[in-house]
Image (cartoon, rainbow, N blue to C red):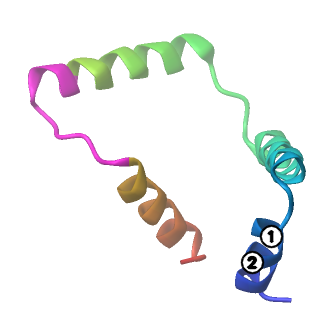
Amino acid sequence: MSTQQLTAEAMALPLSERVSLAQALWQSIEAGLADTDERAAGREAVRRDQELSSGAVEGRTHEEVMQAARRALGCG
């Protein structure tokens, strides 16, 4: 079954089942991520916030971020 077919079937599920599926998928992704240093992650978040607030960088919409993620993962 292709990802497109699987997505279509998942989208046809009732809301509560889609939420459960999304949670299970996210947990499987989190489990595969390397542990990060929380202080370093906090510093990075503050740095990025300062860049956005100062206008040094321009933010992206959720859709732009999701499209970039799909391209990076080769699924879209």
Residue 13: x %, y % from top left:
86, 63
Location of residue 73 (image quadrant)? bottom right
Q: Secondary structure at mark 2?
A: helix
**44 or 53: which is nearer to us?**
53
Mark sitting on residue 45: none
User: The magenta stretch spans which residues?
Assistant: 51-61
Looking at the image, the residue that sits furthest to the top is 39
Q: Residues within 10 Å of mark 2 (few under 14, many from 20)?
A: few
Q: Give left or right: position of 73 versus 25.
A: left
Please tell me whether the stretch drawn in magenta is mainly helix, strand or loop: loop
Name the quarter where the C terminus is drawn: bottom right
What type is the residue that disc 1 sits on? Ala
Q: Give left or right: position of 75 versus 4.
A: left
Q: Is residue 73 magenta?
A: no
Say which residue appears at 75% left-offset and 67% top-offset. 11
Q: Secondary structure at mark 1?
A: loop
Say which residue appears at 81% left-offset and 51% top-offset. 15
